[in-house]
Image: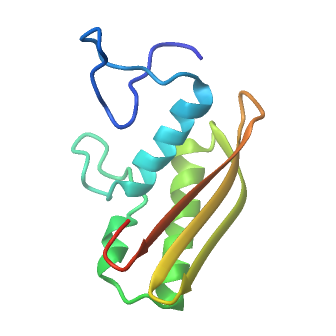
Amino acid sequence: MSGRHLAFPFHIGTDGRSVAPANLDEHVRGEILQLLLTNAGERPFIPSLGGNLRRLVFHGNDEVTAGLAKANIAQALSYWLGHRVKVLNLDVDNQDAVLAIDLSYEVIDTGEQRRVRLEHGGGSV
């Protein structure tokens, strides 16, 4: 891993310094979560950054919302993290008042394959 990166979520270690991720795979996972949970316009100096998933919380849980989530995720990952990750599989499913997002990806620099799952339903994320 080149350079020092901040851990996500940001926190201070026992030595009083900001904590860095343990490895590149952990750093990339943090980047993915930050990207997907950031709404466009939320970052003043990079207004187009974001996956806009939190905005979908107020939409009905139907096929349209699932399709919109999948399109937002695919576009954001390709544009912002296409140099870091290769998307292997992206499934967005809406069943029984739960919107579930399963993302399988490969970290380009290490070749490691990872998976992230996000769910929203019943008042929790």
Q: Quadrant of the C terminus?
A: bottom left
Residue 40, position as x, y percentages in the image: 32, 58
Q: Along the line of sight, which residue is nearer the eye, 85 or 123? A: 123
Q: Along the line of sight, which residue is nearer the eye, 18 or 108? A: 18
Q: Is residue 118 above or below residue 22?
A: below
Within the image, what quadrant is residue 106 found in?
Answer: top right
Q: Residue at x 50, y 62 (%)?
A: 118
Left/right of residue 26 with respect to residue 20 in the rendered view: right
Left/right of residue 6 with respect to residue 98 in the rendered view: left
Q: Residue at x 31, y 43 (%)?
A: 46
Q: Residue at x 49, y 72 (%)?
A: 69
Q: Is residue 59 above or below residue 49?
A: below
- Please count the marks in the image: 0
Q: Residue at x 40, y 66 (%)?
A: 53
Residue 13, position as x, y percentages in the image: 31, 18
Q: Is residue 47 above or below residue 124?
A: above
Q: Quadrant of the N terminus?
A: top right
Q: Along the line of sight, which residue is nearer the eye, 9 or 59? A: 9
Left/right of residue 106 with respect to residue 83 in the rendered view: right
Residue 21, position as x, y percentages in the image: 48, 24
Residue 75, position as x, y percentages in the image: 55, 60
Scheme of colours in the image: rainbow
